[in-house]
Amino acid sequence: MKKHLKFIIIIFMAISLAGCGYNSLQQQEEGVLKAWADVESNLQRRADLIPNLVRTVKGYAAHEKDTLTQVVEARAKATQIRLSTKDLSDPDAMARLSAAQGKLSSALSRLLVTVEKYPDLKANQNFMALQDQLEGTENRLNVARQRYNAAVELFNSSIRKFPYNLTNSMLLHLERKAYFKAEAGAAAVPQVKF
């Protein structure tokens, strides 16, 4: 009888653990980390393209030095901010990254407005190719941010619902991850002046 009772207890524990979410929570956290790596990859691609874009524009618009300097400085600041996977739970760290990337986006927008003044530059094949690459990178970056936020949403909701919340509080101790948010004022319509 004791053997049967031990066997039943072992079976019951195995079934209980299968539904506790231990593996699911870890898999979802890995999904968040992978999605963040995709965001970082696209941020790096953007940072790598900018010097080529600036050099091409510099050749045509040497007297627009202020705009070019702002782009270079914004790129430098944006690439200095690095987040580790542990920082994904820190909303302040995410806000600092978002602000730096927002300044870079703003500087790039001013650069592209400057380009409108130079028809020869707009027709230059190298510039057009770089502009297309940068636009594609911005689109990829937006998709990567959305996927990251979707992974965070799934993970954060999972560690809060029953029975996964018990598994997390007793075994894993995983923290909620911070969403990638737009910088303050991002909802305002940008002013384009020629």
Image (tube, rainbow, N blue to C red):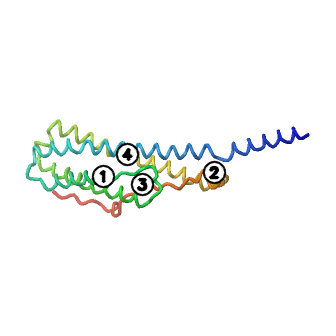
Q: Position of residue 84 (x, y in %)?
A: 42, 50
First-in-chain label (3 vs 1): 1
Residues tagged 4 and 1 counted as in contact (Cβ below 8 A)? no
Say which amino acid is labelled 4: Glu
According to the picture, the residue beneath numbered tag 3 turns out to be 180
Of mark 3 and mark 4, the one earlier in the sequence is 4
Return the residue nearer the eye: 144 or 8.
Answer: 8
The residue tagged 4 is: 40
Asked which secondary structure carries label 2, the reply is: helix
Q: Element under label 1?
A: helix
Structural distance between the alpha carbons of marks 2 and 3: 27 Å
- Alpha-carbon span between mark 3 and mark 1: 18 Å
Q: Amino acid at mark 2?
A: Leu
Mark 2: few/some/many CA within 10 Å (<14, 14-19, 20+):
few
Q: Amino acid at mark 3?
A: Phe
Residue designated by label 1? 80
The residue lying furthest to the right in this view is 1
Neighbour tally class for label 1: few under 14, some 14-19, many 20 plus, Cα within 10 Å: few
Residue 10 position within the rendered picture, expressed as x and y whole percent measured from the top left: 78, 41
* Lateral position of residue 79 relative to residue 143, left or right: left
Mark 3 vs mark 1: in front: 1
Which residue sits at x=14%, y=45%? 57
Instruction: Return the mark for residue 2.
Output: none
Query: Do labels 2 and 3 touch, CB within 8 Å?
Result: no
Question: Marks 3/4: CA distance?
Answer: 12 Å
